Image: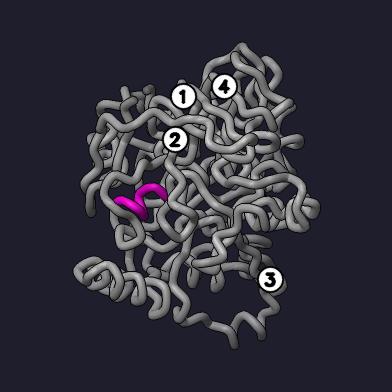
C-alpha cells in the first residue's frame, strides 16, 4: 500500500510499504477513505523528529471502511463505516472505566513514562503506524472505532477522530459560566471548533485571537468576535480592557509549543534539532523547549478566579511558569490529552441532523490526494494558500 512516511526534518514522502494485517484478536483492518493533517503533526515535521525514525507512518485523524476484524472483535464487521480515535484505549481497564481513555493502562507506553499509545506519533507513544495511508491496522478495535452512518460526506464525521472532541474537552475544561466570556488563543482547526462549541454551550461572548487573515475570516463567518494579535502591543492588556477591565472568565490555549513571538523558545527548538537524536531527546524532554508566549498571555489575560484550558501540545519539563501570579489570582489550569470516546455521545447528535450547528463542513480548506501529502504539509506549516485544514484522500 501507499503511506506517508517520515524521513527527516521537513521531509515526508509517500512510499510503498507492506500492507497491515491482523496481528492480535482485537485488531481490525480499515481501508482509509479520508485522513487529515493535524496541527500536532507539524510538531513531528519540525520539533519532535528525534523521536521518529525514517519510514515511520504518520497520521492520527483517519476514517474509512472496515475490511477485516480479528476474532476478538464482535461489535464491528466488514463494510462498517468508522472513525478511528487518535488514542488507542481498551475501554475496560481502571483508567478507561473512569473515562480517562488517554491514560489507558492497557496501552500506556510505560517505558517512556507516557499515557495511552497514539497512532502515528513517535516512539514516545508507541511507534504505532499511522493513518495517512491506504490501510490501517487498528489495535483494541473491540472498543476504539466509532461506528457512523453510511450517509453524509466524510468531513461530517472525520473530525471525531481528534480535533472535534479535543475542542469539546477544552471548552468543557474551560467551564465558562453561562452568559460569560470565553477567549480562544489560536484559530487553527481546534481553535475554530473551540470558539464554535463555546458559543453552542452557552458563552455569551467568544473572542478568538490569531494573526492569519484566513483564520480570522473563518471565525467571523461563525459569529466569533476576533482580535488580530499582530496589531496589538499588549495582548493580555487588550483582552482585559475588552472584558470589563477584569478579563475573560475562561481562556483556551489552542496553540501550544510552537507559538509565534518566542525567540528564545525557537532558538532552543532549533538547537535541539541540530543535536544527535539521543541528545536532542534529552534536551527536548528535560531542559524545556516550549515557546510559552501564548500560555503566559492566557494566564495573564484570564480574570481572577478564572480558568485556563490548554489543548495545545507542550513538551518541556523545565519551562518557567508564573506560579506566584497564578496563585495570587486564583487561576485554575486544566490540560491534557483528549479522552476522545468520553465526549462522542455528546457530540454525535450535533452531527446526525440535517443542520450543521458546529459548522463541521466549513473547516476543510483543501482536499488533496495522498500522493500530494508532502506539498500539503509544507503548505499547512507555512500557512499558504489560505490553508486552515487539509484532508487527504488515499
Of the residues under marks 1 and 3, which one precedes in the sequence?
A: 1
Mark 2 element type: loop
* Highlighted magenta segment, given as a residue range: 40-45
Q: Where is mark 4, residue-wise?
A: 68
Residue 317 point in image, percent of width and height = 47, 77
Give the distance between the C-alpha atoms of the residues marked 4 and 3, in whole angstroms: 45 Å
Picture coordinates of residue 259 (x, y %)? 38, 61
Disc 4 crowd rating (10 Å Cα; few below 14, some 14-19, many 20+) is many
Quadrant placement of the C terminus: top left
Residue at the farthest bottom position? 324
Residue at horizontal 65%, vertical 44%?
A: 340
Mark in front: 4 vs 2: 4
**Spatial separation of the CA atoms under disc 4 and disc 2:** 16 Å
Dot 2: within a 10 Å radius of its alpha carbon, few (fewer than 14), some, or many (20 or more) residues?
many
Q: How far apart, in angstroms, are the residues tagged by discs 3 and 2?
A: 35 Å
What is the secondary structure assignment of the residue under circle 1? strand
Residue 7 inside the magenta-drawn segment = no
- Return the residue at label 2: 131
**Residue placed under numbered mark 3 in the picture:** 332
**Rendering coords of residue 199 (x, y %):** 67, 42
Q: Which residue is mark 1?
A: 32
Distance in Å between CA atoms under marks 4 and 1? 13 Å
- Distance of mark 2 from mark 1, alpha carbons? 7 Å
The reply to whether dot 2 and dot 1 touch (C-beta < 8 Å) is yes
Estimate the spatial distance between the alpha carbons at disc 1 and disc 3, rounded to whole Å: 40 Å
Q: Is residue 242 visible?
A: no
Q: Quadrant of residue 265?
A: bottom left
Q: Quadrant of residue 201?
A: top right
Please identify the dominant SS of the magenta region: helix
Amino acid at each position: 500500500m501507499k503511506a506517508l512516511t517520515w524521513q527527516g526534518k521537513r521531509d515526508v514522502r509517500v512510499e510503498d510499504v507492506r500492507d497491515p494485517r491482523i496481528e492480535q484478536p482485537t485488531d481490525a483492518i480499515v481501508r482509509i477513505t479520508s485522513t487529515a493533517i493535524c496541527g500536532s503533526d507539524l510538531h513531528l515535521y519540525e520539533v519532535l523528529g528525534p523521536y521518529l525514525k525514517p519510514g515511520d507512518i504518520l497520521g492520527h485523524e483517519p476514517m474509512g471502511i472496515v475490511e477485516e476484524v480479528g476474532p476478538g472483535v464482535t461489535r464491528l464487521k466488514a463494510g462498517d463505516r468508522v472513525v478511528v480515535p487518535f488514542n488507542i484505549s481498551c475501554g475496560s481497564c481502571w483508567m478507561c472505566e473512569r473515562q480517562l481513555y488517554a491514560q489507558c493502562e492497557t496501552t500506556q507506553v510505560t517505558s517512556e513514562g507516557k499515557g495511552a499509545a497514539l497512532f502515528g506519533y513517535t516512539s514516545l507513544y508507541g511507534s504505532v503506524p499511522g493513518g495517512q495511508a491506504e490501510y490501517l491496522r487498528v489495535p483494541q478495535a473491540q472498543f476504539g472505532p466509532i461506528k457512523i452512518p453510511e450517509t453524509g460526506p466524510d468531513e461530517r464525521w472525520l473530525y471525531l477522530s481528534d480535533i472535534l472532541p479535543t475542542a469539546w474537552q477544552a471548552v468543557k475544561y474551560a467551564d465558562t459560566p453561562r452568559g460569560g466570556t470565553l477567549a480562544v488563543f489560536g484559530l487553527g482547526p481546534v481553535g475554530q471548533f473551540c470558539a464554535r462549541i463555546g458559543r453552542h454551550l452557552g458563552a455569551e461572548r467568544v473572542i478568538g485571537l490569531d494573526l492569519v487573515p484566513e483564520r480570522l475570516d473563518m471565525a467571523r463567518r461563525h459569529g466569533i468576535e476576533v482580535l488580530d494579535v499582530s496589531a496589538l502591543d499588549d495582548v493580555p492588556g487588550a483582552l482585559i480592557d475588552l472584558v470589563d477591565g477584569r478579563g475573560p472568565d475562561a481562556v483556551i490555549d489552542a496553540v501550544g509549543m510552537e507559538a509565534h513571538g518566542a525567540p528564545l523558545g525557537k532558538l532552543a527548538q532549533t538547537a535541539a534539532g541540530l543535536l544527535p537524536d539521543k541528545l536532542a531527546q534529552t534536551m527536548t524532554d528535560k531542559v524545556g523547549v516550549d515557546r510559552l508566549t501564548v500560555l503566559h498571555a492566557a494566564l495573564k489575560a484570564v480574570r481572577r478566579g478564572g480558568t485556563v484550558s490548554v489543548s495545545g501540545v507542550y513538551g518541556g519539563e523545565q519551562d518557567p511558569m508564573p506560579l506566584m501570579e497564578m496563585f495570587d489570582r486564583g487561576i485554575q489550569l486544566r490540560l491534557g490529552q483528549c479522552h476522545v470516546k468520553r465526549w462522542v455521545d455528546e457530540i454525535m447528535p450535533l452531527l446526525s441532523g440535517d443542520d450543521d450547528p458546529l459548522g463541521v463542513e466549513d473547516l476543510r480548506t483543501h482536499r488533496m490526494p495522498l500522493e500530494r501529502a508532502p506539498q500539503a504539509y509544507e503548505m499547512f506549516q507555512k500557512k499558504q494558500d489560505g490553508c486552515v485544514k487539509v484532508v487527504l484522500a488515499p
